[in-house]
Image (cartoon, coloured by chain):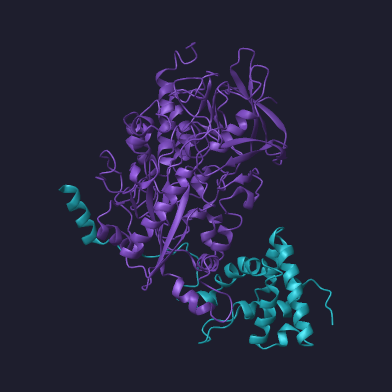
Amino acid sequence: MTETRPALNDHDFMKALLNLLIPPSASRELPGAGALGLETAVAAALQDDPSLGPMVEAGALAVREAALAEHPEGLPAMAPEAGTKVVEAQLTAHPFLMMGLLRYLYPAYYQHPQVLEGIGEPPRPPFPEGFDVEATDAELLEKLLARRRT
Amino acid sequence: MPNEPVGVLVIGAGASGAAFAWSIADTGMSVLCLDQGPWMKQQDYPSNGLDWEARGMGDFSPSPNVRGLAADYPINEEQSEISPLMFNAVGGSTILWAAHFPRLTPRDFRSKSEDGVGEDWPIDYQTLEPYFALNDRMMGVSGLAGDPAYPYHEPPLPPLRFGKTGNTLASGFEKLGWHWWPSDSAILSREYEGRAACINLGPCLSGCAQGAKASTDITYWPVAQRKGVQVRTGCRVREITVGADGMAEGVLYYDPEGQLQEQKAEIVVLACNGIGTPRLLLNSVSKQHPDGLANSSGLVGKNLMFHPYAAITGIFAEPLHGRRGPVGCSFWSHEFYRTDRSRGFVRGYSFEAVRGLGPAQSALSGMIQGLVPWGEDHHRAFDRFYDHTASLLAITEDLAEETNTVTLDPELTDSHGIPAPKVSYRLSENSRKMLAHAVERGKEALMAAGAVETFAQPLFREAGWHLMGTARMGRDPSTSVVNEWGQAHDVKNLFIVDGSVFVTAGAVNPTSTIQANALYVADSIKKNIETLFDPA
């Protein structure tokens, strides 16, 4: 079976692919990237990127075709181990696939409130609350100034 | 309707243009500044949103080639080992800088006398000293008096908090007995001149939404405007025009509607940075100046200096809360600043302690280093990496070479059809050796600070912030473009006040020195106004 849609616009396929790149954490505190609805934003960012976008689309197409050759329903229906093998098999022919996907997936994933909470960060922008930081080590500073005095 | 002629026309509203315009307004002359960018709004900066890291790599990227905004011009950097970075807006690159604020050291002004390399400046540290101090007050500088690497000076505000990252890294330097000192930072540690103290947002490099970081749109410009200086935004200068007497008459520029306008002025001042300034001079060709304006020496666009950077990172067992706080402003080290020929290179480098990255940039950095994989092991590796890194940046002194150049690209143009700059830059063998030395010493310091693992980028390509040397100052018109007052040798009413005039680069961030020099040039004009255009 051959799909004709661009792979980056194939939502089910992209969800499955993103979930292989960032699966749920073992404790399930952190969701898989495919569960956060990031596929549209990642695809749009790649399609706006004239250098990475075409390379990632070509690589993703190859992955989708290879997955369909293994399973009639393709990557979404495959177990993670089997799906990972399919992806890895395409990386030599498509060396920019991972770099291109992760360039846009990581910023999208690590700005999601659920993920920020999961990694121990407050799910808010830096401004306006800001953060506290530890004061300068007074003992260290005193050593420095003492050395300066001598 | 033609524009009214002005007394002083400043091109570029960044670090140097703002300082110069503020000072020259004391003369009572009409002062106008043209900038190709807009006024920025703090509510538009990325740290207002959860997508702050993504935007820092997109519309707030330091690379004009990545941003591609209307205010930007493209740069052909295919033949450069370092990517030039800048921001085009009122405030210029101070919008996106780290505000790490060291001065050049006294020895940086006399590298030829000291070490037999480069050239000596026609001015020295002492000449600039009062202007450094004035500029520190205008920008709002935090720091600690007494650094033995410098003549004594007192920053107006106490130093910023180190945070756990700075404390950890400083302990390594202290253990090794190496020089370190709390940085001078153009970031407020206390409320100052109506601006609040820093609340440690973290993403200084994509604009300070709070206004604690100095950028000239919120420091110099409001005061300059109160003195009557006008700023016209969205105006891109195409060329400087000259009269039959060879003096600058004014400029031709594109207004925000894309219409070509003429602006006449008695004095024209270039503050467009080390790439924008030679680009404009080279594009200002006339019968009297067939090779570009102020270019009888042939040196406009030559001797381009960056600061080649190495980034050395340690992974620590304990969390360091590194994304919190000003990114680059805890301490510096001049341990390896001076020449020691036994190291195999001349001149030296400084270290700047920097804090950690946000989660997205940590993941990307971990990917590039092969330390954070995709797939099943991602979370475990990320957990070990994120919030557990601290870095040292080695800022090495670049020596001027005529083969490192800014020229006009024969094909690439900006949105107005003006030729884009082409940067040709190769790292010298001296710089390579220096970077290699810095990587090893940086790793040593990180291990002494308790790192469990280190890695390095021996040449940080995306670090071409500091653009210097392309219209250098000197007393001899055959070996320099401007004199010791920033006045073009060839065109008496043309001045340059940005980093183009640097004779040497030193091994520290240049903005403090660029601004001090701009204030000095303005003062020199004020003091010599009666005889300014007399023949030499």
Instruction: Name which quarter of the figure residue A132 lies in.
Output: bottom left
- B507 lies left or right of B149: right
Residue at image position (50%, 71%) is B371
Instruction: Name which quarter of the figure residue A48 lies in.
Output: bottom right
How many marks the image carries: the answer is 0
Give residue B23's position: percent from left, percent from top: 43, 30
Q: Is residue B59 above or below residue B239?
A: below
Q: Is residue B124 above or below residue A29?
A: above
Give residue B56's position: percent from left, percent from top: 55, 58
Residue at image position (51%, 46%) is B465
Between B457 and B167, which is closer to the camera in this rendering? B457
Residue at image position (38%, 53%) is B352
Between B161 and A88, which is closer to the camera in this rendering? A88
Q: Which chain gets the purple colouring? A: B
- A96 lies left or right of B44: right
Give residue B89's position: percent from left, percent from top: 57, 44
Q: Which chain gets the cyan colouring? A: A
Instruction: Name which quarter of the figure residue B12 lies in.
Output: top right
Residue at image position (65%, 81%) is A84
Q: Is residue B65 above or below residue B522?
A: below
- B158 lies left or right of B75: left
Q: Is residue B191 above or below residue B298?
A: below
